[in-house]
Image (cartoon, rainbow, N blue to C red):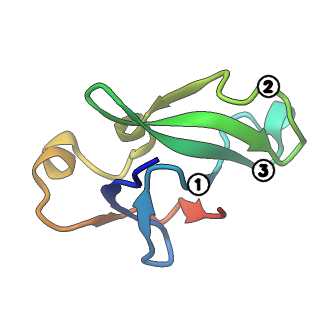
Amino acid sequence: MVLENTMFLDKNGNPIFTGNVIRMPTCNEQVHGKWVDYTVKKVPGGYAFAYFRSAAGQILPDGHTGSYVFENCPDVNMEELMFSLVPLQIDSWEIVA
């Protein structure tokens, strides 16, 4: 598998590549606990997060749910995301693998 730079940085300034596992806070703490880990995948139109595991354990099958990366960037507007010439740092994301 060829790793591809996504042009995003995690909260520590580390570049995020396809294949990385990213931890982010969840909006559904009752089910997942405080965080969810997603695997970064290349998909048509960009990159997506595929479910990997939760703080509460393996709630869903690996890859069962996910979303396009831009749906998880509430602090970044689409123009900034699409036309950025420098990597964008997302303070709520952290590379864990």
Residue wearing tag 3: 34
Mark 3–mark 1 Cα distance, whole angstroms, equals: 14 Å
**Sequence order check: which comes first, mark 2 or mark 1?**
1
The amino acid sitting under disc 3 is Lys
Residue 36 x %, y % = 70, 45
Label annotation for residue 22: 1
Is residue 46 rendered to the left or right of residue 9? left
**Element type at marker 1?**
strand
User: Which callout, 3 or 1, points at the residue further toward the start of the chain?
Assistant: 1
Residue extending farthest to the front is: 1
Picture quadrant of residue 69:
top left
Instruction: Tell me which label, 3 or 2, sits earlier in the chain.
Output: 3
Q: Quadrant of the C terminus?
A: bottom right
Whether the residues at callouts 3 and 1 have beta carbons within 8 Å, the answer is: no
38 lies left or right of 77: right
Task: Give the residue at x 35% y 39%.
Answer: 70
Q: Amino acid at mark 1?
A: Ile
Please tell me whether residue 54 is drawn above or below residue 28 in the rendered image: below
Q: Quadrant of residue 64?
A: top right
Closer to us: mark 3 or mark 1? Answer: 1
Q: Circle 1: is it few (<14), some (14-19), or many (20+) Cα within 10 Å?
A: many
State yes or no: discs 2 and 1 in contact (Cβ < 8 Å). Answer: no
Query: Residue 92's x, y, as percent?
Result: 53, 60
The tag on residue 60 is 2
88 in relation to 66, above or below: below
Residue visible at 43% across and 61% down?
Answer: 16
Up-down relation of residue 63 to residue 91 (above or below): above
- Side of 13 where 35 appears, left or right: right
**Label 2 Cα crowd, 10 Å radius (few <14 / some 14-19 / many 20+):** few
Q: Nearer the viewer, residue 30 or 10?
A: 10
